[in-house]
């Protein structure tokens, strides 16, 4: 079985490639990535093949995805602030790029698992966010992801393409990048905490998110590929554990064994105030899922950062404690 992962050198993609390569049912894993946000080093030690290429390169994309049994489409231009800085680039990568992937999958006859985002719900106030709610994107990024998932479902209806669209909710964990202007909240917090710097919070910190550990996401994606799971509607990939940013910071402090300095600033344009996903459809498709608790996921994430960066402060872990890996 050949599986191709677009964005395979990225944070989620590299974790997934490692998991897929370990499965006996899969004899070939290809990571397709333009390395704009991914890193070839994320695949070090993995048997996954890295092909450096862009999803806007239709000829190369079609060649790489040819004969693939399944494609997990993770490649995207992430980040709400990045889309505000260059909305056209976000559209090109996330919407047009997805159509190119769909065409390549249609040519290969491949099963598609595509990543969408909880950001598509936008200004819809109801909680928890369930898949029958209207979508009201607040940013070009959210609009481009809504377009991408709509195209995937349309290809399923129009051409019989077997597809599953999953709406990711704030994924975090090992391999996630930090140290740049568009870093997600948890890696930015962990990086600052380990560096002995104040944690910068956009807004009052009472906004809530449904954080999902990357290991849980990889488990779902792997099951989806092996089971050739499809659905005619989007499916939330969430586990219903809604917490505030302040609570996340408190847990990080507990793991590190010390109080953390926090600096609050203005809210960011395009950010959703509260996000909490219903998971009825997810559990119907993948019964028996056991998500990793936030505290456990944060501990694994902190352990990974502590062993990969030149941080000047102790993590507060007991002497001789082993670092967790994913």
Image (spheres, rainbow, N blue to C red):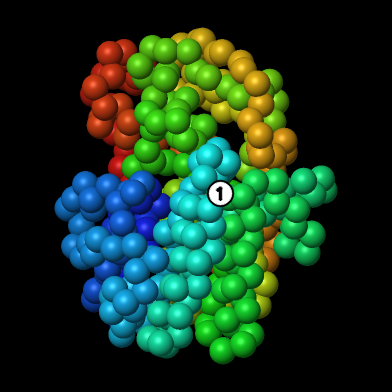
Name the residue at 46% across, 66% down. Answer: 97
| Of the pair 313 and 82, the residue shown nearer to us | 82
In this rendered view, identify the residue nearer to me: 176 or 77: 77
Left or right: 17 as drawn, with respect to 212:
left
The N terminus lies in quadrant: bottom left
Is the residue marked by circle 1 packed among few (<14), some (14-19), or many (20+) residues within 10 Å?
A: some
Residue located at (61% from left, 50% from top): 140
Give percent across and percent down for residue 263: 56, 13
Residue pointed to by mark 1: 87
Across and down, in percent, residue 172 comes to: 47, 42
Residue 311 seen from this side: yes
Q: Is residue 31 above or below residue 252?
A: below
Residue located at (40% from left, 73% from top): 71
Q: In the displayed image of the protein, which residue is found farthest to the right?
A: 126
Side of 28 relative to 218 (left or right): left
Q: Is residue 291 above or below residue 195?
A: below
Q: Quadrant of residue 58?
A: bottom left
Q: Is residue 219 visible?
A: no
x then y, percent, for residue 266: 65, 21
In the structure shown, which secondary structural element does the residue marked by tag 1 occupy? Answer: helix
Query: How many numbered marks does the figure carry?
Result: 1
Q: Nearer the viewer, residue 251 or 273?
A: 273
Report whether 194 appears left or right of 118: left
232, 240: nearer the viewer: 232
Q: Is residue 8 above or below residue 184?
A: below
Q: How far across and how far down the image is residue 183, in percent?
A: 45, 34
Which residue is pictured at 20% across the width and 57% down the height? 46
């Amino acid at each position: 079985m050949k599986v191709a992962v677009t964005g395979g050198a990225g944070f989620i993609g590299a974790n997934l490639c490692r998991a897929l390569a370990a499965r006996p049912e899969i004899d070939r894993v290809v990571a397709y990535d333009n390395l704009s946000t991914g890193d070839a080093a994320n695949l070090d030690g993995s048997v996954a093949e890295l092909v450096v290429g862009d999803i806007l390169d239709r000829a190369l994309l079609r060649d790489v995805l040819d004969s693939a049994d399944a494609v997990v489409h993770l490649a995207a231009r992430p980040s709400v602030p990045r889309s505000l800085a260059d909305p056209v680039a976000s559209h090109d990568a996330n919407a047009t790029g997805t159509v190119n992937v769909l065409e390549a999958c249609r040519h290969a006859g491949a099963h598609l698992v595509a990543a969408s985002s909880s950001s598509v719900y936008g200004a819809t106030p109801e909680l928890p966010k369930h898949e029958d709610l209207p979508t009201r994107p607040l940013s070009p990024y959210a609009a481009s992801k809504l377009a991408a998932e709509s195209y995937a479902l349309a290809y399923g209806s129009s051409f019989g393409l077997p597809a599953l669209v999953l709406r990711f909710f704030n994924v975090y964990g090992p391999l996630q990048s930090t140290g740049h202007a568009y870093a997600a909240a948890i890696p930015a917090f962990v990086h600052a905490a380990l560096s002995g710097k104040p944690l910068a919070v956009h807004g009052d910190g009472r906004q809530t998110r449904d954080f999902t550990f990357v290991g849980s996401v990889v488990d779902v994606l792997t099951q989806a590929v092996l089971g050739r799971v499809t659905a005619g509607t989007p499916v939330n990939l969430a586990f219903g554990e809604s917490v505030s940013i302040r609570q996340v910071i408190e847990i990080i402090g507990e793991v590190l064994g010390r109080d953390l300095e926090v600096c609050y600033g203005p809210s960011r344009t395009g950010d959703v105030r509260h996000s909490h996903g219903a998971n009825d459809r997810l559990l119907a498709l993948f019964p028996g899922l056991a998500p990793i608790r936030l505290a456990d996921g944060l501990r694994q994430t902190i352990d990974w950062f502590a062993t990969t960066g030149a941080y000047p402060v102790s993590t507060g872990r007991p002497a001789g404690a082993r670092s967790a890996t994913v």
